[in-house]
Amino acid sequence: MIKLDNISVDFELRGQQAKAIKAVDQVSLHIRRGEVFGIVGTSGAGKSTLLRTINLLERPNAGRVLVDGEDITDLTGSALRLERHKIGMIFQHFNLMHNRTVFDNAAFALRVAGKSEAEIQQRVPEILKLVGLEDKAQAYPSQLSGGQKQRVGIARAVANHPAVLLCDEPTSALDLDTSAAILELLKEINVRLGITIVLISHEMSVIKKICSRVAVMAGGRVVEQGDAFDIFATPQADFTRQLVAHTFNLDIPEHLIENIPGTVLKVLFLGDKAEDSVLSATSIRFGVSVNILHGKIEYIGSRAVGLLVVRLADLPAEVVPPELAAPYATPAAARIAAAVQFIRDNATQVEVLHAH
């Protein structure tokens, strides 16, 4: 659907030390029809610049932009304007006309496209109903909440039945509950209308809620791309691992880990394994205490990612029921080592944080 082929964008600096900054550096992406594709990275990574090359709001210095099989890189004038009618866009700060009603803001794209007044009167109520603002048609932006303003922006963006919807940090100016509602609306639009969505964000938490695939950007380059579940579950690039770790927020102060007796593991479970009772089986089979120090299960789409920090230690013999006493014929160190191996065999990934 969208193919970005070796895209580079340079920005010229002025002054005595004038030189070009490469905002986007040889990026290639293939975005499939009907998917929700995320581009994530910190501020200055080049996300917005790359997104804006898709509708040529930023013209690349090198590379080609193809949308729906058509190379649009060199389009200008009326041909470019016609192509942009097929690509809707929503913005971080809404970009509404404050002296126009909700109806007129939503109708703006239709008027620019040359639609008749009859077509506008038919289409605007449809899109306001789609975004849940049918009762706000005559309100002004100053009378709306942030979430409602973004809904107007979405209505305006989909007014011309676009094939593609570009979303530039659509939730970063909103609170958590409103952000979640906007993401749900975008998912609904993707499913109901079949629109291909390209969404950028600096928050991995936003990406995991809505995107099926994702590209991670740093320093103008894509450092990793792939299925959203794989990016979250088994990130390959150091930068991606940092973003994912921040999202999971499983940090335990190192001094606490160092002072905890026993063997401390960080255990990753993916998919069905996240729902298996591996830890309870470990305790029973090897006669060891398994304490969960910290843990979290996230869902990427419908698939689970479980991450736990656990402590393994020997159980005092006096607390072990007679029917479970058999494992104690083996020394504690050997049992704990066997327990660690058992967890390795049944989990997706295991890291020993320390062993005392």
Image (cartoon, rainbow, N blue to C red):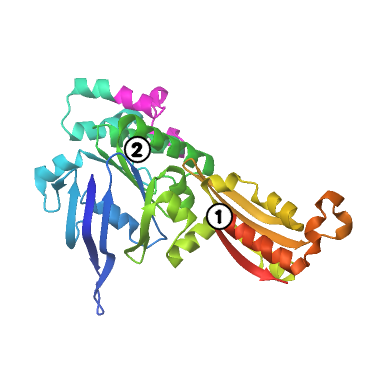
Q: Which amino acid does label 2 sit on?
A: Gly
To which quarter of the image does residue 124 belong?
top left
Say which mark, if any, is on residue 248: 1
Point out the stretch of residues depicted in magenta. Answer: 124-146
Q: Earlier in the sequence, mark 2 or mark 1?
A: 2
Residue pictured at 64% horizontal, 53% vertical: 295
- Find the distance from the CA under tag 2 to the CA under tag 1: 31 Å
State the residue lying farthest toward the right: 318
| Image: 168 above or below 146 | below
Q: Please tell me which residue lies in front, 318 or 325.
A: 325
Quarter containing the N terminus: top left
Residue pictured at 89% horizontal, 57% vertical: 318
To which quarter of the image does residue 140 belong?
top left
Residue pictured at 44% horizontal, 53% vertical: 230
Say which mark, if any, is on residue 49: none
Direction from residue 88 to residue 232 in the image, left or right:
right
Q: Measured from the top left, where is residue 120 in percent x and y? A: 23, 24
| Image: 147 above or below 311 | above
Q: Please tell me which residue lies in front, 78 or 213.
A: 213
Q: Magenta stretch: residue 133 in it?
A: yes
What residue is disc 2 on? 153
Q: Measured from the top left, where is residue 155 in percent x and y? A: 33, 33
Q: Which amino acid does label 1 sit on?
A: Phe
Quarter containing the C terminus: bottom right
Direction from residue 118 to residue 214 in the image, left or right:
right
